[in-house]
Amino acid sequence: MAGDARELEGQVPRSAWERFLVFLEMIKFEHTVFALPFAYVGLVLGSFYVRGTWPTLWMWAWTTVAMVAARTLAMTLNRIIDREIDAANPRTRARALPRGLIGVREAWAYAIASFGVFVLAAAMLNTTALLLLPLAAGILFLYSFTKRFTAWSHLVLGAADALAPLGGWVAATASLHGPSVWLFLAVTFWVAGFDVLYALQDEEFDRAHGLHSLPARYGAETAIRIARVFHVLTVLFLLALVGTAGLGAWYLAGVGAAAAILVYEHSLVRPGDLSRLDAAFFTMNGVMSVVLFAFVLLNYLV
């Protein structure tokens, strides 16, 4: 789909299908891979923690729908709220809204539809998920504004993405338990760390336009060090889950693999050399979430 959308570059999409493809490209729909496996990790761990068995097909299905809808909502809101900033930034001015490939009203329609699906999915899971939904939606909405007043906005993005495993846990248990907090913190610092790295490419733009990020505030070298600390914390919080719901050797192997991926990711990014940033951001983070989920599955299958 993304490839089809790229074929539309340079022209205004005419049909509803063409505009839908542009919308998927605008929100980078394929990057759902970053958070969806962690939602499944929360779902599986919560189910074994409380029920001692696998999640039901109903839980799998509606967790998937909720996760996709929540991410679509968050990304659409971000693109709408940041459209003027995106238009001024050479890196992002080619996005759909600044170029007029789709209109703001149409983007809002997608956001409202996504929110509706999100509410439906939460209601189909359990009452607790539905009651917690306003808090989750509020965090998703808040993130896009934080870069306007704090350099630590990366942590808010991390918390927003970490709602995925927390939501998976609630989907399976209709409650929150201690281990779910460790998982939430692990994903928060994982996402915050790679968002710091991603923000390196906008360091000068952010500084010139009064936007806040760790690279803009402290410079690339210090920001990279902070990202490393965030990712060390990620590994420590993942290790804190050992023993939870029977997590053992296979899970430990998965944490080791995740740590190795993070080390490799940081080897790709250096101050003054961002040539391999896309590989670090898009490829390695997608790989890490899938790998960890695979090892969680192996923990219960083998």
Image (tube, rainbow, N blue to C red):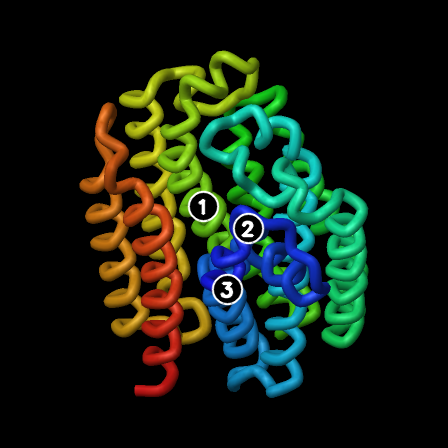
What residue is rendered at 48% in x and 56% in y? 6
Residue nearest the observer in this picture, 16 or 184: 16
Badge 2 is on which residue?
Answer: 161
Residue nearest the observer in this picture, 84 or 161: 84
Mark 3 is surrounded, within 10 Å at the Cα level, by few (under 14), some (14 to 19) or many (20 or more) other residues, namely: few
**Marks 2 and 1 in Cβ contact (< 8 Å):** yes
Circle 1: residue type: Val
Closer to the eye: label 1 or 3? 3
Badge 3 is on which residue?
Answer: 4
Closer to the eye: label 2 or 3? 3
**Horizontal relation, residue 249 to residue 42: left or right:** left
What residue is rendered at 28% in x and 73% in y? 250
SS class of the residue under badge 2?
helix
Residue nearest the observer in this picture, 17 or 252: 17
Find the distance from the CA under tag 2 to the CA under tag 3: 27 Å
Give the numbered dot on residue 167.
Answer: none
User: Between disc 2 and disc 1, whose residue precedes?
Assistant: 2
Mark 2 is surrounded, within 10 Å at the Cα level, by few (under 14), some (14 to 19) or many (20 or more) other residues, namely: many
Identify whether 156 is placed above or below 52. Answer: above
Find the distance from the CA under tag 1 to the CA under tag 3: 28 Å
Residue 48 point in image, percent of width and height: 51, 78
Badge 1 is on which residue?
Answer: 191
Q: Quadrant of residue 167?
A: bottom right
Residue 3 point in image, percent of width and height: 45, 62
SS class of the residue under badge 1?
helix
SS class of the residue under badge 3?
helix
Circle 3: residue type: Asp
